[in-house]
Image (cartoon, rainbow, N blue to C red):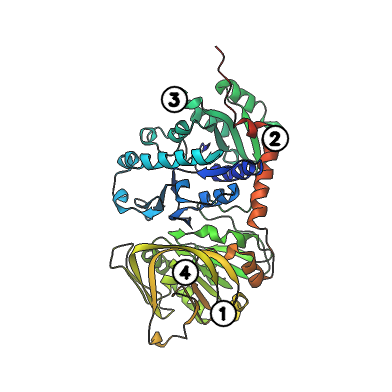
C-alpha cells in the first residue's frame, strides 16, 4: 500500500509505477483505491472509476473494473459531491452524512478488496490524503483500515520539494496507533532536487526515531507523462506553433485527457483562466464540466463568454467536449434536477436536456468528413469514452446558424464552421490524432508506464521492492 503525508505527495504516481514494476517482474497485479475524490473518471465494465485506478490497471496489465475503485466522489460544489458506488451514481449515499456513509460502504469496499486479493498475486493499494487525519480515523475506509484488512506492506511517501518532509513523515507515523505503525515498511522522499548526499543524516535519524528505513529518494520528474490525478497540470513553457488554450472553469472535469497535448513539441499550450489568455488563443478548447450551469455563469462573469463567441465567429478553431459542447447550444434543460438549467452561449443550433440516468460508454470512434483545421481528423479511428447525463438534439430549423454537420453517429458530435463539438473524451490520447493535427509523434502510454517502472527501479534501494512482498521480520524480544 502507498499512503502519503499529504494530498499531492505522489501516491498515484508511485502506485502506478509499482503496478508496472511488479507486472514486469512476472506477477499478476491489480490496483485498488477504496475511495477516490476526483472529477477525472474513466469508463470501464460496470460504469466508471477514477482515472488514476484506470491507468494503474493498464500499468498492471489487467482489465480495469469497478472493484478497483468501488467508491468515487465527484465534487459538484465545495460542500457536495456526486457519489459513485461500484461504477453507478448513488443519490441515497450522496444524501448521507459523511461519517454515517462509512459504515454503509465498508462491506462493499472490503468485499471488492477481498476478491482482488484472491484473484491476483499482488494488489497495489493507494490511500487518500493522509492516514493521520485523526478527526477521520474512526470513519476511515481508505487508508490504514484498508492496510490492516489486507495486511499490506505500507509505504509512506512525502513531497520533499514542499519542505518539512522529515517532520511530515515522523508526525504521520507518530499519530498512528502501534498496530498500524507496524505495517509501515518504508519511507519515500519524492520530488527531490539537488545533491542527495545533503540529506544525511536525516534519513538515519528518522529511522532511529521510528525504526522505519527510507527506502527511496525519488528525484523531481516533471515530464513523466502520467496524467495528474486531479488539478490543472503544468503546461509547457515554450512552443512557436499554434497557441492552444484550454478554458479552465472552476468545475472542469476529465482534464487528464489533455495531458498528451503537453508533450507535443512546438505547440504553445496554456490554461485559460482569464479573458487575456482566452483572447490570445489560436485554437480554443472547452473541456468537460461537472456543473455546466455554474461554469456558464462563471464564463459570463469573467467576460470569457463574449470572447468564445468572438473566437468562433472569427472562424478560429474551437473544440468543445461534453460539457463544453452543451455550453455552445441554445440552452441546457434539467427537468430531473441533475445539476441545473441555464441559457447556453447560443453558438450552435441545438439544445441539451439532462437525463436522470447517466450514460457510460467506451468504444472505437471514427470522425466523419471534418473540414478546415479539423480536416486531417476525417477517417481517423481512436478509442474514447462517454460519461454524461446530457442528451443533445439539433434544432430542425437550424435557428439561422451555419450548417450543423454530424461527424459522429448517434448525436455524439457535430462540426459547425470551424467549431468541432464532441461528446467523446480521450481523443488526444490517440497518437494518430496528434500526428494528424500537429504532425508530431509523442511517446506512447506504454513508453510512459515502462519509464515509471525504470524510475522506481533505480530510485529504490536494491531488493527493496521485492522485499515488500515478503513477510516482515519478527520483532526482537
Q: Local crowd at mark 4 within 10 Å, few (<14), some, or many (≥20)? A: many
Q: Nearer the viewer, mark 4 or mark 2?
A: 4
Residue 126 visible here? no
Vertical position of residue 267 compared to residue 456: above or below: below
Which one is nearer the viewer's eye here, 301 or 348? Answer: 348
Answer with the quarter of the image where residue 277 lies.
Answer: bottom right
Q: Earlier in the sequence, mark 3 or mark 2?
A: 3
Residue 258 is situated, as x and y percent measured from the top left of the image, at 56, 61
- The residues tagged by marks 1 and 3 sit, at their Cα atoms, a distance apart of 61 Å
Task: Name the residue that disc number 1 marks.
Answer: 370
Residue 389 visible here? yes
Q: Earlier in the sequence, mark 4 or mark 2?
A: 2
Task: Name the residue that disc number 2 marks.
Answer: 196
- The residues tagged by marks 4 and 1 sit, at their Cα atoms, a distance apart of 15 Å
Q: Residue at x 33, y 66 (%)?
A: 355
Mark 4 falls on what kind of element?
Answer: loop
Task: Name the residue that disc number 4 marks.
Answer: 423
Mark 1 falls on what kind of element?
Answer: loop
Q: Residue at x 53, y 29 (%)?
A: 184
Amino acid at each position: 500500500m502507498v499512503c502519503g503525508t499529504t494530498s499531492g505527495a505522489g501516491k498515484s504516481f508511485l502506485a502506478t509505477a509499482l503496478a508496472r514494476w511488479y507486472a514486469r517482474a512476472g506477477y499478476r497485479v491489480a490496483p485498488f483505491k477504496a475511495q477516490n475524490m476526483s472529477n477525472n473518471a474513466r469508463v470501464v465494465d460496470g460504469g466508471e472509476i477514477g482515472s488514476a485506478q484506470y491507468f494503474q490497471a493498464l500499468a498492471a496489465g489487467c482489465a480495469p473494473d469497478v472493484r478497483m475503485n468501488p467508491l468515487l466522489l465527484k465534487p459538484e460544489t465545495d460542500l457536495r459531491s456526486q457519489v459513485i458506488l461500484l461504477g453507478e451514481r448513488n443519490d441515497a449515499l450522496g444524501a448521507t452524512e459523511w461519517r454515517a456513509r462509512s459504515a454503509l460502504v465498508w462491506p462493499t469496499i472490503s468485499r471488492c478488496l477481498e476478491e482482488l486479493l484472491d484473484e491476483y498475486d499482488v494488489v497495489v493499494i493507494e490511500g487518500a490524503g493522509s492516514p493521520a487525519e485523526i478527526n477521520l480515523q474512526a470513519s476511515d475506509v481508505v487508508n490504514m483500515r484498508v492496510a490492516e484488512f489486507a495486511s499490506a506492506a505500507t509505504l509512506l511517501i512525502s513531497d520533499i520539494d514542499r519542505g518539512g518532509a522529515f517532520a511530515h513523515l515522523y508526525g504521520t507515523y507518530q499519530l498512528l496507533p502501534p498496530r498500524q505503525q507496524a505495517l509501515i515498511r518504508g519511507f519515500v522522499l519524492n520530488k527531490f532536487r539537488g545533491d542527495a548526499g545533503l540529506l544525511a543524516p536525516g534519513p538515519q535519524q528518522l529511522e532511529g526515531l521510528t525504526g522505519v528505513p527510507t527506502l527511496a529518494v525519488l528525484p523531481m520528474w516533471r515530464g513523466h507523462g502520467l496524467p495528474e490525478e486531479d488539478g490543472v497540470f503544468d503546461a509547457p513553457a515554450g512552443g512557436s506553433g499554434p497557441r492552444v488554450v484550454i478554458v479552465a472553469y472552476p468545475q472542469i472535469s476529465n482534464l487528464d485527457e489533455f495531458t498528451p497535448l503537453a508533450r507535443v513539441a512546438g505547440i504553445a499550450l496554456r490554461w485559460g483562466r482569464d479573458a487575456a489568455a482566452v483572447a490570445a488563443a489560436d485554437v480554443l478548447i472547452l473541456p468537460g464540466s461537472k456543473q455546466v450551469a455554474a461554469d456558464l455563469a462563471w464564463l459570463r462573469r469573467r467576460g470569457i463568454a463574449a470572447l468564445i463567441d468572438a473566437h468562433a465567429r472569427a472562424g478560429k478553431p474551437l473544440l468543445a467536449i461534453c460539457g463544453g459542447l452543451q455550453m455552445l447550444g441554445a440552452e441546457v434543460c434539467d427537468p430531473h434536477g441533475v445539476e441545473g438549467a441555464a441559457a447556453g452561449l447560443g453558438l450552435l443550433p441545438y439544445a441539451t436536456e439532462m437525463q436522470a440516468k447517466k450514460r457510460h460508454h467506451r468504444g472505437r470512434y471514427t470522425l466523419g468528413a471534418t473540414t478546415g483545421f479539423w480536416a486531417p481528423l476525417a477517417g481517423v479511428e481512436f478509442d474514447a469514452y462517454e460519461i454524461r447525463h446530457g442528451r443533445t438534439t439539433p434544432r430542425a430549423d437550424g435557428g439561422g446558424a451555419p450548417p450543423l454537420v454530424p461527424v459522429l453517429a448517434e448525436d455524439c458530435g457535430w462540426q459547425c464552421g470551424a467549431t468541432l463539438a464532441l461528446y467523446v473524451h480521450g481523443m488526444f490520447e490517440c497518437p494518430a490524432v496528434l500526428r494528424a493535427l500537429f504532425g508530431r509523434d509523442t511517446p506512447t502510454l506504454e513508453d510512459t508506464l515502462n519509464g515509471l517502472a525504470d524510475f522506481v527501479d533505480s530510485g529504490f534501494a536494491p531488493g527493496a521492492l521485492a522485499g515488500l512482498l515478503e513477510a516482515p521480520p519478527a520483532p526482537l524480544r
